[in-house]
Image (tube, rainbow, N blue to C red):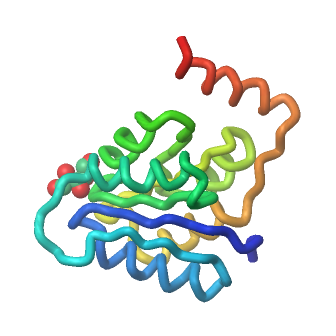
């Protein structure tokens, strides 16, 4: 079980059902869920949804973000363009844990056409229950963030 956090959720049309399942799953764990949609299933554009969630995290309105599209890749690319965001795509739990512990990721991306619902929940749990280890990893994360100012 993870410490309660404010978590923003977003997706494109390809991942609405999985996003809603994740929202229910993490709300039941005591997290505060900020689900910014979309609600209806029409085809939409993943960059704007990735950016919108990333701005909530970067602006401090959410502690962490979970975003989804068909592969998880496009929405992750959009989120990572927002200054302050470190988002990784995960299709298994080891990486989901490590991007928190070593990379201090503040966003997780999942491909709803890549993993099933049960694995997605395990990935989310691994991400949310892990904490950044700091130490030697802090300097490396600082090096990532310094690239934003070059
Ligand atoms: C939408 O068809 C699809 O391209 C999108 O969900 C995502 O996989 C993009 O990276």
Q: Is residue 13 left or right of residue 88?
A: left
Residue occupying the far top of the picture: 150
Residue 13's image quarter?
bottom left
Question: Where does residue 25 sit, x and y in percent of width and height?
Answer: 54, 83
Can you say which quadrant of the picture contains the N terminus?
A: bottom right
Q: How many marks?
A: 0
Is residue 124 depicted above or below 23 in this figure?
Answer: above
Question: Where does residue 28 sit, x and y in percent of width and height?
Answer: 60, 88
Q: Residue at x 43, y 56 (%)?
A: 53
Pick the front one: 94 or 133 = 133
Is residue 67 depicted above or below 122 in this figure?
Answer: above
Q: Residue at x 64, y 54 (%)?
A: 94
Q: Is residue 100 left or right of residue 77?
A: right
Residue occupying the far right of the picture: 135
Is residue 81 depicted above or below 111 in this figure?
Answer: above
Question: Where does residue 132 sit, x and y in percent of width and height?
Answer: 77, 47
Residue occupying the far bottom of the picture: 28
Is residue 80 depicted above or below 3 in this figure?
Answer: above
Residue 27's image quarter?
bottom right
Question: Where does residue 101 sit, x and y in percent of width and height?
Answer: 74, 47
Q: Residue at x 37, y 75 (%)?
A: 18
């Amino acid at each position: 079980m993870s410490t309660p956090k404010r978590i923003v959720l977003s997706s494109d049309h390809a991942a609405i059902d999985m996003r809603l399942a994740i929202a229910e799953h993490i709300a039941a764990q005591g997290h505060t869920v900020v689900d910014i949609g979309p609600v209806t299933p029409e085809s939409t554009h993943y960059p704007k949804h990735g950016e919108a969630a990333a701005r909530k995290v970067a602006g401090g309105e959410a502690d962490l973000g979970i975003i989804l599209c068909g592969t998880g890749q496009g929405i992750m690319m959009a989120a990572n363009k927002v200054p302050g965001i470190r988002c990784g795509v995960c299709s298994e739990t080891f990486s989901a844990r490590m991007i928190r512990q070593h990379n201090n990721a503040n966003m997780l991306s999942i491909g709803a056409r890549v993993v099933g619902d049960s694995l997605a929940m395990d990935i989310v749990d691994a991400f949310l229950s892990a904490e950044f280890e700091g130490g030697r990893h802090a300097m490396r994360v600082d090096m990532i963030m310094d690239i934003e100012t070059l």
